[in-house]
Amino acid sequence: MAREGFLDYLTAHRRGASEKREIESPEEMAKEIKKVAKLFGAELVGITYFDERWVYTHKYSRRSEDEQEMDLPEGLTSAIVVCHEMDHALLETVPSALSGTATGVGYSQDAVTLLALAQYIQNLGYKAVASMNDTALSIPLAIKAGLGEYGRHGLLITPEMGPRLRIGKVFTDLPLVHDSPVRFGVKEFCDICRKCSDACPPTAIPDGEPSEVTYNRSNIPGISKWTVDGEKCFDFWAKQVTDCSICLRVCPYSRDYPAPLNRFRIKLMGTFLRRFLLWLDNFCGGGDRKPPSWWWFDSYTK
Ligand code: SF4
Ligand code: SF4
């Protein structure tokens, strides 16, 4: 069976081992999986339990042009969530046709890492389903896997690279210990910051408190959170005939500093200094758009 495009999970090309390797320690196995995922290109890896609340009930088939039951194997117990960083300089040119490259490259890296990781697990004799945007929501799984917090713009914000990332996951029955969610002050920072909601052209991002409001069938009912009107957002994309991601560009968590400095800055954003950090970001022109010509001729040459 071949993958049916963007809406389907990735198909493994080889069968795995017929016998399961005995796993004595799920802790050690989790360490091994994280190491291997990083070897295959993942920048961040977290593990959580397989939670059917985030799995789609149906998928859309492009071949038959109708909906079909989700056909995941029985007995899945864990989701291994991996992230790849999106290029910061490209994202500074958002919105532009050029900036879409950051997304495309992220997806391509995701596919390589996820397929290799799923094959590794299958070779240990266990089930593994590699998934990108299909099959289940990635952001709740990433939060449960301890990779970051939820931002006002509805995206995962990590301590390492903010929201500049693509997320993929592998569902498996391999025995693994699970990570716990982390808090580093994103909610409190978003409470005082409105850069994404102010900058969103179709006003798809809420500027108030988290709530249970839903706008259309693309939103999940019954959860109190900042809910983005995804249909308004995508309508804007379609009209301008390219990606948008302005919310990603303007977010103060998106800046690109050397890793130790960025870690320290993001740590401070979670303290009583958050108002000062927000002021500093605005003062320094954080998130201002650069033209695509800047990327071609001036970026990386400083
Ligand atoms: S991608 Fe653009 S339109 Fe969509 S929520 Fe972000 S800023 Fe708004
Ligand atoms: S732009 Fe500001 S409000 Fe929006 S997600 Fe980023 S930190 Fe939160």
Image: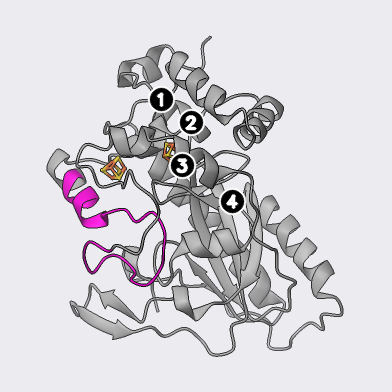
Q: Which residues are magenta?
A: 214-236
Foreground residue, 122 or 163? 163
The answer to whether the beta carbon of the residue marked 2 is less than 8 Å from any atom of ligand 2 is: yes
Q: Is residue 29 above or below residue 161?
A: below
Residue 191 circle label: 3
The answer to whether the beta carbon of the residue marked 1 is less than 8 Å from any atom of ligand 2 is: yes
Circles 2 and 1: CB atoms closer than 8 Å: yes
Residue that mark 1 sits on: 287
Left or right of 33? Residue 202 is: left
Circle 3 residues within 10 Å: few <14, some 14–19, many ≥20: some
Circle 1 residues within 10 Å: few <14, some 14–19, many ≥20: many
Residue that mark 4 sits on: 148
Three-letter residue code for mark 4: Gly
Ligand 1 found in image quarter: top left
Left or right of 27? Residue 218 is: left
Give the spatial CA distance, label 3 vs label 2.
13 Å
Q: Secondary structure at mark 3?
A: helix
Three-letter residue code for mark 1: Gly
Work out whether mark 1 precedes mark 3 in sequence or the reverse, and give the earlier one: 3
Three-letter residue code for mark 3: Asp
Foreground residue, 39 or 174? 174
Q: Secondary structure at mark 4?
A: loop
Three-letter residue code for mark 2: Pro
